[in-house]
Amino acid sequence: MTTTAVRTPRSALLRRGGDVMSERFKVSPAQDGLPPRREDACRVGVMRRIAAARLRYCGLESMADDVMLIVSELLTNALQHSSTTEISLSITVEDGALSVRVRDGMPGTCTAQHPKDTAEWGRGLLLVDALTKGSGGDWGTEDAGAETWCSLPVPEEGQP
């Protein structure tokens, strides 16, 4: 796993935009119906913690909870539903919006499911949809589904 630390104060980050974090890591391809390898699944938690720390450093701690959930859901989807060997995560700020992008490089469809009330899985993208749209943002896919992105408005300085 490669970690790139970018030390940009919030005022400069919001003024000109820039990277909050950029990560790329190798994974084992998903196997039909089997859960991801433990080592790969643990990387989701590591990426959540790095994202939260980077947001705090950039003065965007008010966004940390929503971004950590989005990071978890998008990375988990990439692990479970693609047969990729590499996943990348980037978080940037540009034009007053924070962008979260997860790329697995495997084209395919990425749509929110509507599972039965008793289902134990399948609500991840519904959560992503609710969080992004509830804050005035949006989400979608690019490159035939090889990349999933979310865009959230950055609160004005002084706002929670």
Image: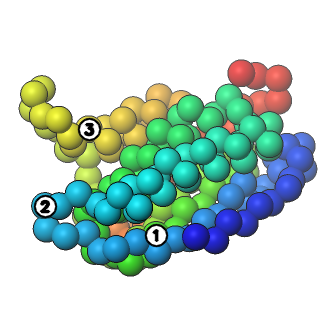
Q: Residue at x 60, y 61 (%)?
A: 90
Q: Nearer the viewer, residue 87 or 141?
A: 87
Residue 108 image point, x, y percent: 26, 70
Q: Nearer the viewer, residue 57 or 62?
A: 57
User: Dot 2, crowdedness within 10 Å: few (<14), some or many (≥20)?
Assistant: few
Q: Secondary structure at mark 1?
A: strand
Q: Kindly identify which residue carries mark 3.
A: 123
Among the two numbered marks 3 and 2 on one chain, the one whose residue lies closer to the N terminus = 2
User: Dot 3, crowdedness within 10 Å: few (<14), some or many (≥20)?
Assistant: some
Q: In the rendered picture of this protein, how many numbered marks are placed on residues?
A: 3
| Mark pair 1, 2: CA separation | 19 Å
Q: Secondary structure at mark 3?
A: loop
Q: Residue at x 47, y 28 (%)?
A: 134
Q: Kindly identify which residue carries mark 2.
A: 33
Residue 145 image point, x, y percent: 34, 68
Please state if 101 lies on the left or on the right of 98 as rendered. Answer: left
Q: State yes or no: discs 1 and 2 in contact (Cβ < 8 Å).
A: no
Please state if 76 lies on the left or on the right of 16 as rendered. Answer: left
Please state if 154 lies on the left or on the right of 66 as rendered. Answer: right
Quarter location, residue 129: top left
Q: Kindly identify which residue carries mark 1.
A: 87
Image quarter in which the N terminus is found: bottom right
User: For the residue marked with disc 1, what is the amino acid?
Assistant: Ile
User: For the residue marked with disc 3, what is the amino acid?
Assistant: Arg
| Mark pair 3, 1: CA separation | 21 Å
Image quarter in which the C terminus is found: top right
Q: Residue at x 62, y 35 (%)?
A: 64
* In the depicted structure, whether residue 152 falls above or below residue 6: above
